[in-house]
Structures are given as structure tokens and as C-alpha cells.
């Protein structure tokens, strides 16, 4: 960016979306740092990606306010109110040209938030939205820019369908567009993912009709060949220190201290072989869906939830998201009965399972819990 700014030419900075991280507390922490830096770089427009709603709309809006992030989107609505959740388009004047920037999200991308509230969004058909909006925008601006958070082939389809888009920047893709490409009179640009690349298009734009007259494209890999910026390096070093502290605090809340390294959880399939009757009750129970419940909520990396929705979470050799322990998803037989390697037939080993319920069915998560009525539902 310094290289571009030093040239003194007008620069329009665009981002195709999916700036935010995955749905867990660590990545949310990291996302805030990223937002701060992107805010400082002074990006002119960011198209909404489905990832950017991972932490809920309130978090997205707080990042926009705090760091001046110009997110925009024309087809995602709050399902309850029917209102668009972001500015429908942005207008930016640069180098004597007025740009109208519009972004749409692929309705096939699932939006899942990890906010406490149940948020639902309605995503309108991109072509229908743009067919109406682009001509209106053309009245107001010189050059229309599409940030299509649609992936390669769908962005191409949209550009073929809709005329009047001068520049298209594709989001939600892993592919770079490294050469000049014109489709239906639209200059097609794309630099791929995770901030690993930066795309730079030199455009000559006619001041008369806002049309792109000439274009030269270059995609740079942000690898070790690029010198580090000292100021940024210091910030990252400081951030990494804070992230380590944050993670340690988190882990400290769930130490893996119970049980013994010598014992193992054998997994529910092992028990199935000899206990078909117990199995037939278990497969129908909510316990076997406990992980899917988290996945549907996008919370399956979150220690705060995993602790009760998996098997042996705080136990040695218990669930973790790494193989082989990641097969211990759900509240399996051994979540109540304990290590399979301690299997006994003395009556006492089986009886202890009764005491397990309340470690998970606590006041907060299962206020209705009553042993008799709950056991009745999973009796085996
Ligand atoms: C390791 C944590 C854990 C333990 C131990 C546990 N449960 Fe659960 N239980 C859950 C979770 C999580 C759910 C919700 C599952 C879902 O639908 O996602 C649940 C749901 C249930 C349900 C409602 C779902 C259904 O199948 O009808 C019943 C009943 C139930 N538990 C009974 C019990 C009883 C009785 C015990 C003790 C013998 C027990 N649980 C021990 C975590 C646990
Ligand atoms: C202390 C243990 C515990 C923790 C921590 C916990 N849960 Fe649960 N969860 C349960 C139990 C037990 C139930 C079943 C409640 C009942 O049926 O009485 C349950 C039920 C649920 C259900 C309803 C399942 C259904 O389909 O009926 C959802 C959704 C859920 N939990 C999500 C989460 C999420 C997300 C988190 C983390 C933010 C979380 N839980 C943390 C124990 C826990
Ligand atoms: C939610 C906790 C929980 C889960 C999950 C669970 N059990 Fe149990 N299991 C119990 C409890 C509680 C008892 C009854 C203990 C008692 O009253 O003596 C029991 C009893 C048993 C018994 C003894 C039955 C008898 O006739 O005395 C067997 C065998 C058994 N479970 C096997 C399994 C197997 C196999 C699975 C997995 C497919 C499983 N259990 C899953 C809690 C659980
Ligand atoms: C090789 C066969 C086999 C496997 C595998 C097996 N069991 Fe058993 N289990 C038995 C037999 C046999 C008994 C005693 C007769 C009975 O109660 O069904 C028993 C008894 C039990 C009891 C009652 C224990 C007591 O205190 O008397 C429980 C609980 C139990 N099994 C749970 C499990 C769980 C959980 C698993 C998986 C980790 C498992 N079993 C795997 C054969 C097996």
C-alpha cells in the first residue's frame, strides 16, 4: 500500500468480504484486531460476506462504528423487520470520478451467528436486486463497482445478466485473476483469500462517461518477499502476546485435569457391539445429537459449550478437536459411565452413572431437570 500511496495517484481500496474469522472466542478476539488495522488502512468499501455475521449483527455494527469500516450490502435483510441490515450502496469520489459501490451476497451461503439472540436473515436474489439497483445507481454516479460476494462462476453469471457494471471485484473465492479480463464490458478483478494476496488494478477511467478505458492488473502474494512494515510488525507482536494470554485464560477455565492418562474412552460404537438394547435407546436420544446442536449454532469450537456437549471434555484422553479425540463428540455412553477401560460388572460401576447427570444438567442449562422424569426418557 505504501508503494501505491507514494505514487500519488488516487487509490480506491475495496474488499470483497469475509473479513471476519470463524465462530469461536479466539477468532473473535483476532477479528477485532484485524478490524482495527483495516480501519487504519482506510478501505473505501467492504462487501458483506456471510462470515462477517459470525459474531452477530451487533458485533458487526460495533466494529463498523469503532473502526470506521464501510461495510455495504444490497440483498441481506433482517427477517423480522424486512429492512436491509447495511447501507444499500456507497458513493465514493476519487480522482474526479464518482464511484457507486454495490455488494450482494450469495443466498446459498448459510449465515450462522454465535450471538445469544436468535437472528435470522433473508437474502434476496442477487440478479433481481441488481437489475433494479444498477440503473438507479448509474443515474447518480460515473462508475459502478460490484463487490459480488458470490464466488467466481456466480459473479460471472451476474455480470453477464446485468449490464451497466463497470468494475467487478469477486469475493468468496480462492482464485486470483492475474490478467486483464473483460466480460460484458465489465473489468473483472479478483485477489484471493485470507489477506494472502493483494490485487492492484491500474485503471484509466473516462471522465465523460465513467467507462474503463484501459486496465492493467497485478496480484501480489504477500509472502516473505515483501518487506515487513516495522510499525505493523510491532503491533502484531503485541497482539500475539495478548492472544496467548487470552487463550491461556480460556484454557485455564477448562483444565484437562480429571481422570488418568492410563485410561481411555473407547467410543460408543465399541459399546454397541455388546449392548444393543442400551444402544437402541441412545440413538434416539438428544445425547447423540448434542454436537449437531452446537454445529447448527456454529458453536462447535467453543469450550464454553463443548464442555457439556461432548464426552470427557475435561478428562485426560477426552474430547478435543484433534484426532483421535475428535470422535468423542456427543454425550456418549462414557460421558455418564466413565472410561470404558474401567468397565466392570460389579454393579457399582454402572450405578455411579446416576451422579453424572447434574454435572451437565445444571440450573442454567437444564432448569427443569428432575432425575426421575429425565431418566424415564433415556431409560435403558
Ligand atoms: C456430559 C453432559 C451430560 C450428562 C452427563 C448428561 N446429559 Fe443429558 N443432556 C446433555 C445435553 C448437552 C443435552 C441436550 C442434547 C441436545 O439436544 O443437543 C441433554 C439432553 C437430555 C435429555 C433431553 C433429550 C432427550 O433425549 O429426551 C434428557 C432426558 C437427558 N439429557 C437426561 C439425562 C440424564 C437422566 C442424565 C444422567 C443419567 C444425563 N442426561 C446426563 C448433556 C448431558
Ligand atoms: C453445563 C453444561 C452445558 C453447557 C456449558 C452448555 N450446554 Fe447446552 N445443554 C445442556 C443440557 C443439559 C441441555 C438439555 C437441557 C434440557 O433438555 O433440560 C442443553 C441443551 C442445549 C440446546 C437445546 C437442544 C435442543 O435441541 O433441545 C442448545 C441449542 C444448546 N444446549 C446449546 C448450547 C450452546 C450454544 C452452549 C455454549 C454457549 C451450551 N449449550 C452450553 C448443557 C450445557
Ligand atoms: C445420560 C447418561 C447415560 C448414557 C449416555 C448412557 N447411560 Fe447407561 N446408564 C446410565 C444410568 C444412570 C444407568 C442406571 C444406573 C443404575 O441405576 O444402576 C445406566 C445403566 C446402564 C447399564 C446397566 C443396565 C442394567 O441392566 O443394570 C448398561 C449396560 C448401560 N447403561 C450401557 C450403556 C451404553 C452401552 C450406553 C451407550 C450406548 C449407555 N449406557 C449410555 C446412564 C447413561
Ligand atoms: C465385549 C462385550 C462388551 C463390551 C464391548 C462392553 N460391555 Fe458393558 N458389559 C458387558 C457384559 C457381559 C456385562 C455384564 C452383563 C450386563 O449387565 O449386560 C456388561 C455390563 C455393563 C454395565 C453394568 C456394569 C455393572 O456395574 O455391573 C455397564 C454400565 C456397561 N456394561 C457399559 C458399557 C459401556 C459404556 C461400554 C462401552 C465403553 C461397554 N459396556 C462395552 C459386555 C460388554
Image (cartoon, grey):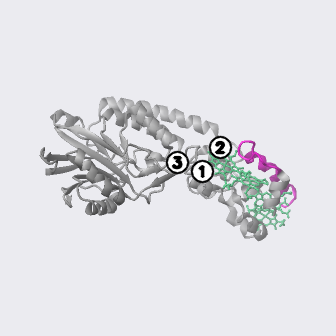
Q: Seen in the image, is 265 located left or right of residue 113?
A: right
Q: Name the residue under label 2.
A: 256
Q: Give the range drawn in magenta.
A: 344-370
Image-quadrant location for residue 287: bottom right
Q: Mark 3 points at which residue?
A: 113
For the residues labelled 3 and 2, the Cα–Cα distance comes to 28 Å
Q: State the residue position of label 1.
A: 320
Query: Where's the N terminus, which quadrant?
Result: top left
Tell me if I can see residue 169 in this picture.
Answer: no
Q: Please tell me which residue lies in front, 257 or 300.
A: 300
Q: Residues within 10 Å of mark 2 (few under 14, many from 20)?
A: some
Residue ID at (24%, 54%): 165
Q: Does the magenta stretch include residue 361?
A: yes
Q: Characterize the local packing of mark 3: few (<14), some (14-19) or many (20 or more) Cα atoms within 10 angstroms.
A: many
Q: Of residues 326 and 380, which is closer to you in this image? A: 380
Q: x, y (%) of residue 222?
A: 29, 44
Would residue 37 be counted in the magenta stretch? no
Q: Are marks 2 and 1 in contact (CB under 8 Å)?
A: yes
Q: Is mark 1 on a helix, strand or loop?
A: loop
Mark 3 or mark 2, earlier in chain: 3
Amino acid at each position: 500500500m505504501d508503494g501505491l500511496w507514494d505514487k500519488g495517484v488516487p487509490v480506491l481500496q475495496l474488499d470483497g468480504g469475509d473479513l471476519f474469522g470463524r465462530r469461536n472466542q479466539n477468532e473473535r478476539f483476532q477479528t477485532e484486531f484485524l478490524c482495527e488495522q483495516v480501519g487504519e488502512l482506510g478501505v473505501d468499501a467492504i462487501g458483506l460476506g456471510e462470515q462477517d455475521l459470525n459474531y452477530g449483527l451487533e458485533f458487526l455494527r460495533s466494529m463498523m462504528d469503532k473502526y470506521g469500516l464501510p461495510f455495504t450490502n444490497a440483498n441481506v435483510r433482517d427477517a423480522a423487520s424486512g429492512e436491509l441490515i447495511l447501507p444499500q450502496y456507497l458513493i465514493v469520489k476519487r480522482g474526479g470520478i464518482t464511484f457507486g459501490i454495490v455488494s450482494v451476497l450469495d443466498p446459498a451461503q448459510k449465515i450462522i451467528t454465535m450471538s445469544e439472540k436468535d437472528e435470522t436473515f433473508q437474502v434476496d436474489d442477487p440478479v433481481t436486486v441488481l437489475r433494479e439497483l444498477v440503473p438507479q445507481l448509474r443515474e447518480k454516479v460515473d462508475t459502478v463497482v460490484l463487490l459480488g460476494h458470490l464466488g467466481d462462476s456466480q459473479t460471472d453469471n451476474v455480470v453477464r445478466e446485468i449490464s451497466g457494471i463497470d468494475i467487478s471485484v469477486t469475493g468468496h473465492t480462492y482464485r486470483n485473476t492475474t490478467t486483464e479480463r473483460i466480460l460484458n464490458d465489465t473489468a473483472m478483478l479478483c485477489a484471493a483469500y485470507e489477506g494472502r494476496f493483494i490485487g492492484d488494478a491500474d485503471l484509466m477511467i473516462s471522465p465523460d462517461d465513467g467507462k474503463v478505458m484501459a486496465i492493467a492488473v497485478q496480484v501480489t502474494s504477500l509472502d516473505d518477499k515483501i518487506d515487513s512494515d516495522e510499525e505493523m510488525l510491532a503491533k502484531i507482536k503485541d497482539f500475539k502476546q495478548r492472544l496467548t494470554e487470552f487463550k491461556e485464560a480460556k484454557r485455564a477455565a477448562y483444565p484437562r485435569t480429571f481422570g488418568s492418562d492410563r485410561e481411555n474412552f473407547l467410543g460408543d460404537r465399541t459399546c454397541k457391539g455388546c449392548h444393543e438394547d442400551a444402544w437402541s435407546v441412545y440413538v434416539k436420544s438428544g445425547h447423540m445429537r448434542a454436537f449437531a446442536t452446537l454445529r447448527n449454532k456454529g458453536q462447535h469450537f467453543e469450550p464454553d459449550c463443548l464442555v457439556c456437549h461432548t464426552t470427557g471434555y475435561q478428562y485426560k484422553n477426552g474430547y478435543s478437536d484433534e484426532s483421535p479425540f475428535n470422535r468423542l463428540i456427543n454425550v456418549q455412553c462414557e460421558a455418564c459411565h466413565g472410561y470404558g477401560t474401567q468397565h466392570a460388572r460389579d454393579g457399582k460401576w454402572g450405578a455411579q452413572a446416576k451422579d453424572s447427570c447434574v454435572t451437565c444438567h445444571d440450573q442454567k442449562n437444564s432448569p427443569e431437570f428432575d432425575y426421575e422424569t429425565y431418566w424415564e426418557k433415556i431409560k435403558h
